[in-house]
């Protein structure tokens, strides 16, 4: 069974955004599978690299879509993007330095963040982007 499963309540209605959300979920599922199989940093660091890249690309896409909108939560949304990206980069740096073990706790944090961000922030843009 996958660590994360796509459900209809995560659909924003924007096919690009929804595909990117699914892609982020796929990376988290790959990280979970690698961790569950006891794979070391050799496998986990490139997956974190992919997570950093995918998250950064996704945030840029979202921000470009809502940049022209009269969207009162725009600054808060951008701040949340920047905060998560920093946290992912920090986790990746700790992993590379050998100061982090990817655990269920780390993956649960990333899973919770993704789901909460989609449901609380991105759904505020549903039908507008």
Image (spheres, helix red, strand yellow):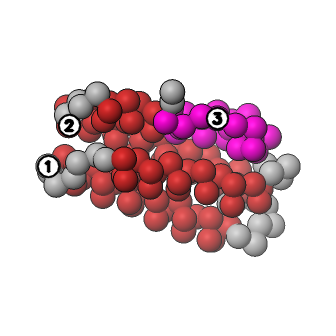
Say which label, 3 or 2, has the lower sequence index: 3
Query: Does dot 2 land on a helix, a strand or a loop?
Result: helix
Prevailing secondary structure class for the magenta stretch in the rendered image: helix
Say if residue 46 shows up in the picture. Answer: no
**How far is the residue under mark 1 from the one under mark 2?**
8 Å
Circle 2 is placed at which residue position? Answer: 41
Query: Does dot 1 land on a helix, a strand or a loop?
Result: loop
Q: Position of residue 113 (x, y in %)?
A: 53, 56
**Label 1 CA crowd tier, 10 Å (few <14, some 14–19, many 20+):** few
**Label 3 CA crowd tier, 10 Å (few <14, some 14–19, many 20+):** some
**Disc assigned to residue 98:** 1
Residue at position x 75%, y 44% in the image: 9
Say which label, 1 or 3, has the lower sequence index: 3
In the rendered image, residue 25 lying in the magenta stretch gets the answer yes
Image depth: mark 1 or mark 3 in front: 3
**How far is the residue under mark 1 from the one under mark 3?**
32 Å
**Disc assigned to residue 6:** 3
54 versus 117 height, above or below? above
Query: Does dot 3 land on a helix, a strand or a loop?
Result: loop
In the picture, measured across the screen, residue 129 lies left or right of residue 110, that is right
Q: Are marks 1 and 2 in contact (CB under 8 Å)?
A: yes
Q: Position of residue 125 (x, y in %)?
A: 77, 56
Q: Identify which residue, 79 or 43, lies in the foreground.
A: 43
Q: Which region is colored magenta?
A: 3-27
In the picture, measured across the screen, residue 72 lies left or right of residue 39, that is right
31 versus 125 height, above or below? above
């Amino acid at each position: 069974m996958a660590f994360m499963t796509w459900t209809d309540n995560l659909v924003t209605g924007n096919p690009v955004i929804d595909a990117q959300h699914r892609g982020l979920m796929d990376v988290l599922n790959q990280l979970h599978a690698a961790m569950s199989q006891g794979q070391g940093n050799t496998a986990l660091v490139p997956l974190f690299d992919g997570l950093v890249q995918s998250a950064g690309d996704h945030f840029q896409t979202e921000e470009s879509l809502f940049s022209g909108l009269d969207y009162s939560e725009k600054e808060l949304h951008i701040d949340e993007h920047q905060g998560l990206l920093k946290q992912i980069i920090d986790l990746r740096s700790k992993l590379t330095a050998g100061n982090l073990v990817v655990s269920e706790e780390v993956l649960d944090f990333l899973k919770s963040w993704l789901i909460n961000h989609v449901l609380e922030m991105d759904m505020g843009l549903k039908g507008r982007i």
